[in-house]
Amino acid sequence: MPFPAIGHRDALLIIDVQNDFLPGGALAVEDGTRIIPMINRLQSLPFGRVVATQDWHPRDHVSFTTTAEKDDGGDRWPPHCIAATWGAAFADTLEQAHIGLIVRKGMNPGIDSYSAFRDNDGGNETGLSQWLSACGVERVFICGIALEYCVRASAHDARRDGFETFVLDAACAAINDDRRGIHHDLRAAGITIMDARTLLKD
């Protein structure tokens, strides 16, 4: 059967296409730049809502290697996406005209937030789930950076919150070239791995 057309009950969720996650940034993902033209093309489809996320960290964020003494048991990264800096800004080549909502995450200095929906401890929510529901969204299509971390966490939370969830694999940048483990994890949670070109072929 043909895939149901994109429409007003669908949302495109663009994860962390920010300078610090692209070549030349503090925490670059090698193929990050490659996915931007495809994400721009996806935005031209008739999605009911287009949402983009930004890591938006304070300078003393717990996830930074420079503040590792605040040990919460989470991952440690070089300082990146510090609020209101060049590294936290969207890539210049990312089209933004269709973006109706920007969700900033990781602002609490004491807990990281990979997901667009809530902090890593499952506590504070961003309000995205409630907003999507209020807009009548039923399906969420996710792309961006990085597949293993923020894309994965956002997909799990979208599915957990009751949305039919698709990860647009070709429009996601990954740290590891071997994506099989991540794909298995996502599928086991009821998330569909989809080639973004399936949506763009027409």
Image (cartoon, helix red, strand yellow):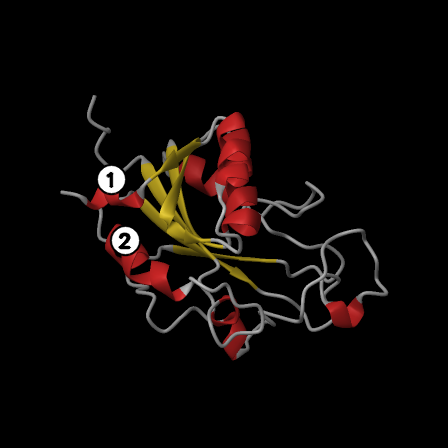
Which image quadrant is residue 7 in? top left
Locate residue 107, reporting x and y percent.
64, 61
Query: Which residue is pictured at 48% across the width and 26% down the height?
Result: 190
Q: Name which quarter of the figure residue 200 lies in.
A: top left
Q: Are marks 1 and 2 in contact (CB under 8 Å)?
A: no
Instruction: Assess disc 2: are there few (<14), some (14-19) or many (≥20) residues with their C-alpha within 10 Å of its C-alpha.
Output: many
Disc 1: CA contacts within 10 A as few (<14), some (14-19) or many (>=20): few
Side of 72 relative to 86 (left or right) = right
- From this viewpoint, which residue is outermost toward the right? 69
Pick whichever of labels 1 and 2 is earlier in the sequence: 2
Mark 1 and mark 2: Cα distance apart in space: 14 Å
Q: Residue at x 57, y 68 (%)?
A: 27
The circle drawn on residue 118 is: none
Residue 159 spot, x, y in % from top left: 50, 31
* Residue type highlighted by circle 1: Thr
1 or 134: which is nearer to us? 1
**How many numbered marks are there?**
2
Secondary structure beneath label 2: helix
- Is residue 172 shown to the viewer in this render? yes
Q: Residue at x 72, y 66 (%)?
A: 64
The reply to whether residue 98 is visible in this rendering is no
The residue depicted at 28 percent of the width and 61 percent of the height is 37
195 lies left or right of 56: left
Please state, as top left, top right, bottom left or bottom right, where the N terminus lies in the image: top left
The answer to whether 63 is drawn above or below residue 189 in the figure is: below
**Disc 2: which residue:** 43
In this view, 183 is above or below 53:
above
